Amino acid sequence: MLRIDLYPLGRGPESLAAQFLYSSLTKTLNLAYMLKLVPLQQKIHYGFRKRVVARIAKVLLAPIPAKLMLSAIEYIRNREYAGNTLADSCGWFGRRQFFDEEWFRSSTMVGMGSGKFPAPEGFDHFLRLTYGDYMTPPPADQQEDEFRIADQYYLKPLRQIGILDA
């Protein structure tokens, strides 16, 4: 099995203060948008406290149109910043949310399993910054938990609405 994370990278701010503001704003908007659209019944993994906070947040977000939130997310994602910094507009990773454009300018072929695949030349630095020791798989019990959660909360809902085959 091959696990892939996709990051929508766009221009990002250069200064640490602007990066902190960008990270905080994108996290807040993305969480608010998710809360606005996702029924709480689907969040069965939420504990009592998180359910209460989510319900309060949904009430506070009720008067704000989802389209307005999406427009704000798109505005940030498409904004043209000066400089050579790329940013992931979907996460909340602090400093790990920002990357040097140079890492992605040229590619190299990297072996994975029995094949070779193109990857940015800066892939090792990027992956270590993002994941730490990315070459060592998590323990088997942690992998089983992750697969169970992925199946329950990501794949099952997509099967139920017909996006994935059952």
Image (cartoon, rainbow, N blue to C red):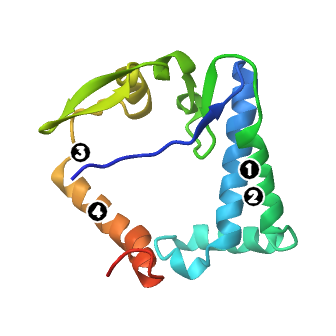
What amino acid is labelled 4 in the image?
Answer: Phe
Residue 112 x/y as whole percent: 19, 35
Residue 15 appears at what percent x and percent y? 72, 18
Disc 1: CA contacts within 10 A as few (<14), some (14-19) or many (>=20): many
Helix, strand or loop under label 1:
helix
Amino acid found under the numbered disc labelled 3: Pro
Report how far apart the C-alphas of labels 4 and 1 lie in the structure. 29 Å
Question: Residue at (88%, 72%) from the top-left corner?
Answer: 63
Which residue is rendered at x = 38% and y = 71% of the image?
155
Q: For the residues marked 4 and 2, what is the alpha-carbon distance in whole angstroms?
A: 29 Å
Q: Nearer the viewer, mark 1 or mark 3?
A: 1
**Residue drawn at 67 percent across, 29 percent down:** 11
N-terminal label among 4 and 2: 2
Say if 33 sits above or below 91 in the image: below
In the drawing, what numbered circle is on residue 70? Answer: 2
- Residue displayed at 63% across by 42% down: 89
**Residue 92 location, x and y as percent?**
59, 42
Residue closer to the observer: 52 or 79: 79
Q: Earlier in the sequence, mark 2 or mark 3?
A: 2
Nearest to the eye among marks 2 and 3: give it. Answer: 2
Q: Mark 1 highlights which residue?
A: 73
Judged left or right of residue 158, residue 114 is left
Circle 3 is placed at which residue position? 138
CB of mark 2 within 8 Å of CB of mark 1? yes
What mark, if any, has residue 132 been given in the picture? none
Looking at the image, tell me whether mark 4 or mark 1 is earlier in sequence order: 1
Residue 72 lies, with reference to residue 132, above or below; the image says below
Residue identified by numbered label 4 = 147
Q: Provide the secondary structure element on which disc 3 rests.
A: loop
SS class, disc 4:
helix
Distance (Cα) linking label 3 and label 4: 12 Å
Look at label 2 and name its amino acid. Answer: Leu
